[in-house]
Amino acid sequence: MVLEEIPGKVSLAVDVSNCPLRCPGCHSPFLQTDTGEELTTEVIDALIADNFGVNCFLFFGEGQDDETFLDLAWHIRDNYPGLEIALYSGRTEVPNPYWRVFNYIKLGPYMEKYGPLNKPTTNQRLYKVEGLRRIDITPQIWKHGIDPIVTGATPTRP
Ligand code: SF4
């Protein structure tokens, strides 16, 4: 459970492995491998049941299978109306269908010279999605000052 990655939200966060990116200085190189337990709708249901009180489900990474990944996000959207859904992506852009299911999307790889998401120099951007609009709320992260280790994102999950 994390508090700062999505401003104003208590997020249940899960790491998604098999990241196709190779950011120099990656905070968690093991996430570049196909490792861990398969994330299924049943696993998500159990995680949500075990973490009463969260109001956002946050994916740190999205693996390499967009279709299956989107199915998981839609499962949350369809079954948990009280939860918002967020993604920390290392990509500079995600496919259009992502913008229809997620409430928040962080874009951009970790680039050492620009620093992590909690630095005003960062190349990464956190967007709040409102209909067809994406609103850059990255400055809210700077204001709250997230811990780059907890955020996974040392600087950038994924
Ligand atoms: S996107 Fe994240 S997990 Fe993937 S290589 Fe970059 S820093 Fe590592």
Image (tube, rainbow, N blue to C red):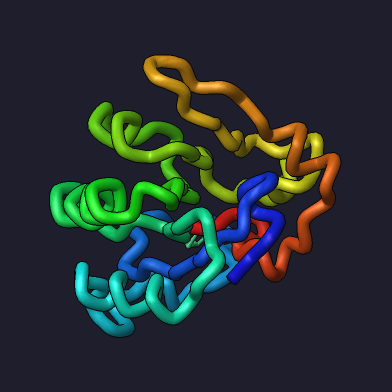
Q: Residue at left 81%, top 41%?
A: 142
Residue 18 vertical placement versus 128 (above, below): below
Residue 149 rendering spot, x and y as whole percentages = 71, 69
- Number of disc labels: 0
Residue 44 vertical placement versus 158 (above, below): below
Residue 45 rendering spot, x and y as whole percentages = 29, 72
Q: Residue at left 52%, top 55%?
A: 55
Residue 131 rendering spot, x and y as whole percentages = 39, 19
Residue 8 rendering spot, x and y as whole percentages = 68, 46
Compared across the picture, whether 152 is left or right of 15 comes to right
Relative depth, front residue between 154 and 43: 43
Relative depth, front residue between 137 and 43: 43
**Picture quadrant of residue 65:** bottom left
**Picture quadrant of residue 99:** top left
Relative depth, front residue between 117 and 40: 40
Q: Residue at left 45%, top 47%?
A: 84
Compared across the picture, whether 66 is left or right of 131 comes to left
Question: Residue lying furthest left in this view?
Answer: 67
Q: Residue at left 26%, top 72%?
A: 39
Which quarter of the rendered picture does the N terminus lie within?
A: bottom right
**Picture quadrant of residue 132:** top left
